[in-house]
Image: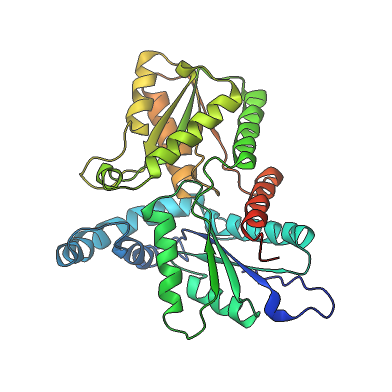
Amino acid sequence: MDEGLVVTAPGEAVSERIGILLTNLGSPVAPTPTAVRRFLAEFLWDRRVVDIFRPLWWLILHGVILRLRPGKVAKSYASVWSEEGSPLLAISCHQATALRESLGRRLPGRCHLELAMRYGEPSIAAALTKLQAAGCERILVLPLYPQYSSTTSASTFDAVAEALKSTRWYPELRLVHDYHTEPGYIAALAASVRESWAKHGRPDRLLVSLHGIPQRFAEEGDAYPEHCSATASALATELGLADDEWLLAYQSRFGREPWLQPYVDRTLAQWGADGVGHVQVICPGFAADCLETLEEIVVGNRNLFLGAGGETYHYIPALNTRPDHIAALGDIVERHVTGWQ
């Protein structure tokens, strides 16, 4: 695991350091049913993710889901696992290293960055302990979720507050709420699309796939669908796409209640049946490739589209450690710590 890199100028007081807490969702520690069960138990018990009446949900979670799903999900993880571990964690570690180096050039001697996962390891509590030990009295929390959702960004902020309950140390905090239309982020997305076009040709349709949430959450005030729409529209504008050349849709629904629509799987099946020959898919809500992109989008939805009659299908990788992505994250950090320098 990457350790935090402290960049300090000679004679500088440690207490002046700015802590950067870079976070993502997390993943199991191994592609095994036992590890997946432990991860799902933590993830699905988060009230921000599933807000069903607790006693009822406990019975469903432990009596049904954690008995049936871990084996299937473990096989999916095994199909994308590498020597470095889960793609999400491995890529996040590389992103953290690249961003540390970038911040060392942008804000020399001032920043200490730690990586944490909302669920699993390295934990938010452990990362905060490292930031405290490094003398950081001011901490910027940067969740790698471009679009705000109560299920992701707010859950991360909850976890930060919960971890700080156990200590009398409480740093000055700033929270990056979202960056769904950050110019550098949109430019990096557009560049990745153009590179895909140069390699595979321009498709008949560009599908902009975002992770779904229950429709009820949006009706209760979650800004996520507005952020997703703004990201997709900004990307389409940057690429000069006509309205009939792209579509925003939502993937990875879970459970029986309605989620944000249109659904990715049904859209691709319909496009294949309608004779849309060439589709490329981009997932701008994922800062790093993970199970939902590498298995669900690359494999499952590809087979669905081709099986329905489609001819050519390509996935445009997440921004991962692209230099323009790291630069965009550096812009976000530098802007948010203004006044702390």
The spot of residue 121 in percent (x, y) is: 49, 69
Q: Residue furthest front?
A: 339
Residue 9 to residue 328: above or below: below
State which quarter of the image contains the N terminus: bottom right
Query: In the picture provided, is 136 more to the left or to the right than 173?
Result: right
Residue 123 seen anywhere in this rendered image of the structure: no
The spot of residue 125 in percent (x, y) is: 49, 75
Q: Residue furthest bottom?
A: 168
Residue 226 seen anywhere in this rendered image of the structure: yes
Tell me what residue is drawn at x 45 percent, y 16 percent. Answer: 244
Residue 329 to residue 206: above or below: below
The spot of residue 189 in percent (x, y) is: 60, 36
Q: Give the total number of marks visible in the rendering.
A: 0
Tell me what residue is drawn at x 72 percent, y 80 percent. Answer: 14
Residue 211 to residue 20: above or below: above
The image quadrant of residue 92 is bottom right
